Amino acid sequence: MALALRQLNFKATLVQSQGQRIQPLIWFHGRYDHDTDLELLIQLNGADSRALRIGDQTYYYSPVGGSYSLQTNVTAGFIPPAFYEPFAHISQHYQVIASGGMRVTGRPAQYLRLVSRDKFRYHYDLWVDRESAMLLKLQMMTPQGEVLEQLQLTSIEFTDHIPAQLTELEAIQRPPRLYEASQLEAPHFNLRPNWLPEGFELRRAQHRRLYDTQLPTDHYLFSDGLTDVSIYITERRQQGLPELAFQGAESLINTSIDGFAVTVVGKLPVATLHQIAERMVLDSQGPMR
């Protein structure tokens, strides 16, 4: 499956659903050379939003939220990065179980379950094409079996060559970088994360002003390969939001700790987010770098 996601040339249609939100998309993918694959995702509902990835550079175009680029070799919010790697990389935290299969999009598929080895994460169900090893369907679900998020291919057409939509990319305008690593400002506040479930690694720690509110905020980003967790720390007197908690595909909590407002967001059970917030610590030596 990891090789298929990188190497196959295809055009696919799919539906991505999260709660009551349903988004149909067109997905083009092609292999340019040994080191570079190309990907284009076009949303078909609402604003004409698109994501274009060329190797490890990804460009996001939206007439609503603005356009920007990131250095990443997967399209954020689509397929988890861990699925582009062998399952051995996540086997310490997820048990992979293969059991039978069914037809998906008219193709025989192998059914796989990714079961969290602890109580801190969601589970995943996958259906993989038996012939091409292409991912055909993905579900993220609670331990109780409630489906929180789903991605379902409705058609796929494999080709010998890169789809025509990916062959004329030179004329497409490249939006500016969302941030440059060399320009990131280190966290300012002395409250910092001290615990996340095993397997989560710090990917970014920075101080910035939030786009919508312009509040000075420390932001920590962690990932275990399947999901990301963001922690936002702001001075309590400036934020002013009530304490709240919401569980879903993208869970969220907002709480107060030692004069700071702490917001934790991620595709994890809300109980896990509470533990992350409750174990924050004041660091007399300054923030974590």
Image (cartoon, grey):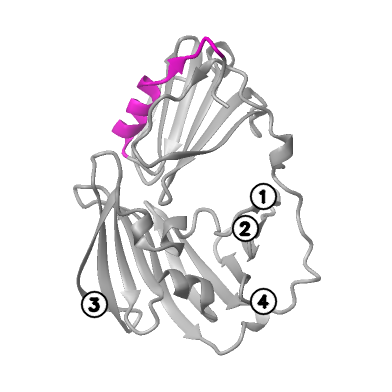
Amino acid under disc 3: Met
108 in relation to 201, above or below: below
Sequence order check: which comes first, mark 1 or mark 3?
1
Disc on res. 102: 3
**Badge 4: how crowded within 10 Å, few (<14), some, or many (20+)?**
some
**Badge 2: how crowded within 10 Å, few (<14), some, or many (20+)?**
few
For the record, the magenta segment spans: 269-285
**Badge 1: how crowded within 10 Å, few (<14), some, or many (20+)?**
few
Q: Are marks 1 and 2 in contact (CB under 8 Å)?
A: yes
In which quadrant will I find the C terminus?
A: top right
Amino acid under disc 2: Ala
Q: CA distance from mark 3 to mark 4?
A: 32 Å
Q: CA distance from mark 1 to mark 2?
A: 7 Å
Sequence order check: which comes first, mark 3 or mark 4?
3
Amino acid under disc 4: Leu
Relative depth, front residue between 197 and 63: 197
Q: CA distance from mark 1 to mark 3?
A: 39 Å
230 in relation to 153, above or below: above
Q: At which x and y percent is residue 213?
A: 64, 27
Q: CA distance from mark 2 to mark 4?
A: 21 Å
Q: CA distance from mark 1 to mark 4?
A: 24 Å
Q: CA distance from mark 2 to mark 3?
A: 35 Å
| Secondary element type, mark 1 | loop
Q: Residue at x 69, y 45 (%)?
A: 178
Q: Are marks 1 and 4 in contact (CB under 8 Å)?
A: no
* Residue that mark 1 sits on: 64
